[in-house]
Image (cartoon, helix red, strand yellow):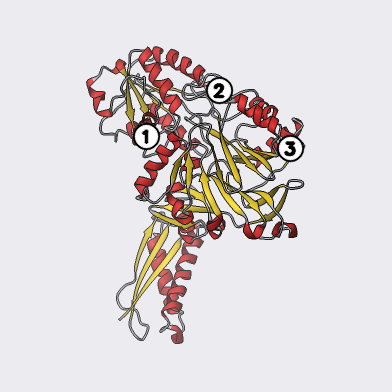
Amino acid sequence: MTLAASSKTRDELVFLPLGGAGEIGMNLNLYGYGPAKSRQWIMVDLGVTFGDDRTPGVDLIMPDTAYIEEHAEALLGLVLTHAHEDHIGAVAHLWPRLRCPVYATPFTATLVRAKLMEAGIENEVPLNIVPLGGRFSLGPFDIELVTLTHSIPEPNALAIRTPLGLVMHTGDWKIDPEPMLGDDMDITRLNEIGDEGVRAIVCDSTNVFSPGASGSEADVAKVLVEVVRECKGRVAVTAFASNVARIESIARAAAACDRHVILVGRAMFRLVGAAREAGYLKDLPPFLTEHDVGYLPHDKVLLICTGSQGEPRAALARIVDDSHPNVTLSPGDTVIFSSRVIPGNESSIFELQNTLAERGIRIITERDHFVHVSGHPCRDELARMYQWIRPEVAIPVHGEARHLAEHARLALELQVPEAVVIRNGLMMRIAPGPAEVIGEVPSGRIYLDGEVLIEADEGAVQERRKLAFAGSVFVSLVLDGAGQVRGEPQVRLHGLPEEDSHGISFEERALDAVDEALNRLPAKKRGDDDAVAELVRRSVRGAIRREWGKKAQVSVVLTRI
């Protein structure tokens, strides 16, 4: 990393995103104070995003913490703004690399503790519970939690005070005038902090292209009652399990329509349990389990299912393909998608919906009725936040590059003096002086591959991607000490067509290529196993490429006798 000369000797307040700047999800933000040689750090959020077709076999993707690991002795703590996976999902996986205290409000702490228990490290992690509106200090950082509204209980902005100024870190938020769960947004406190003077705001950019306001969860609750009342047969509602307010809205709609609520999917039970432990969802009728479905009339059932994004292992997908052990849907039943389509999930969601339609099951989405509302601020809400906080500098985060650029333009239109767009790995000085990028540190991604954490640049995932595109060929050879073939070479093909355009099998093409390679192998190289294997590999791959047009992955196993 290259630092400006002044950074090495004078106190500075810096901001360093390693996740969430230039992408949606996987949030990790660092604030540093002091001269470069002795800078102290706090981390805000440590989240994940999910694997997709580009990362076959990868369940979770998380930010690379290599830089802060090098400075772990100066990391004073990890502060969590709220309990969504893209803000807390990497804590249990990466905390052993950081080993710092963790700070969270009660509901968030409940979910984090469950993850730590699954990882077997709950007794190692100093998990500090901070009350709503609480305030605490970590070295030169004085941190105050300010209650906001979002799609999950206890979302908090952080007012981070330092000797060089105050930074408002919003986390995820929206303006909900009628939140279904939790406290109202503390607008009074936001105005007071604005009066105090704010050097910079680090703010959510997700919905910056959407005009107006996002809307209220209370309005969704009213529409859900109307929609469910019109339904016949069983009703299944799929939503993000973390949207506890939506779960309450769905449950109240069920009660208003004389239906019993049945939770389907482990994530639903986990979130509901955490919410009740933290004091939420207390005054609802008891939720039933999937084992009760068969004992109830169809028109008395409302299922709340995981799987709104078409995840193949989630409850809804298993119900649709008839692999769920206890729950089925029939023609005339209804599935309500009380969620939005996350970019990248379109194909899996539409495939699931097409299967439902083919089975005669009615589908209702946010395009049909107001059954979902975003948890992030639209343009009018962003404008109100800037009116309350009145920062000197705007630093957009939590969005792709186009979101950050548009957010910066909006901030300047709102008379914010400075707006700086940065990406992951860029270190920005917030104070003293003008806000500017002063260096760059390594940044990237870590994959959870099964139960193993691997670096994104390791070859395993890239190899799987190639295999998915062009298949694989395995060749087994037995040679004697003189380099002569013993027995017949064996070839196994995976993921290739059976025959080429001339009607000749690719297995035959591969065997011919093996023979050709061995026939032109110089005598002096017949004793070199590596040379033999490489020549055979190249010959087989070339033969298949000429007839198929794709580069199959070829592996050669050579045995000497």
Q: Which residue is mark 3?
A: 392
Q: Is residue 314 above or below residue 504?
A: above
Is residue 86 visible in the rendered image? The answer is yes
Give the secondary structure at mark 2: loop
Q: Which residue is mark 2?
A: 176
Q: Kindly identify the amino acid type of the residue bearing the numbered disc 3.
A: Glu
Percent coordinates x, y for residue 36 in the rendering: 66, 58
Distance in Å between CA atoms under marks 3 and 2: 26 Å
Q: Is residue 557 above or below residue 135?
A: below
Distance in Å between CA atoms under marks 3 and 1: 48 Å
Is residue 337 visible in the rendered image? The answer is no
**Which sits earlier in the primary sequence, circle 3 or circle 2?**
2
Q: Kindly identify the amino acid type of the residue bearing the numbered disc 2.
A: Asp
From the viewer's side, name the closer residue of 346 and 153.
Answer: 153
Q: Which residue is mark 1?
A: 317
Q: Kindly identify the amino acid type of the residue bearing the numbered disc 1.
A: Ala
Distance in Å between CA atoms under marks 2 and 1: 32 Å
From the viewer's side, name the closer residue of 94 and 498.
Answer: 94
Percent coordinates x, y for residue 217 in the rendering: 50, 21
Q: Is residue 133 left or right of residue 555?
A: right
Percent coordinates x, y for residue 103 in the rendering: 48, 42
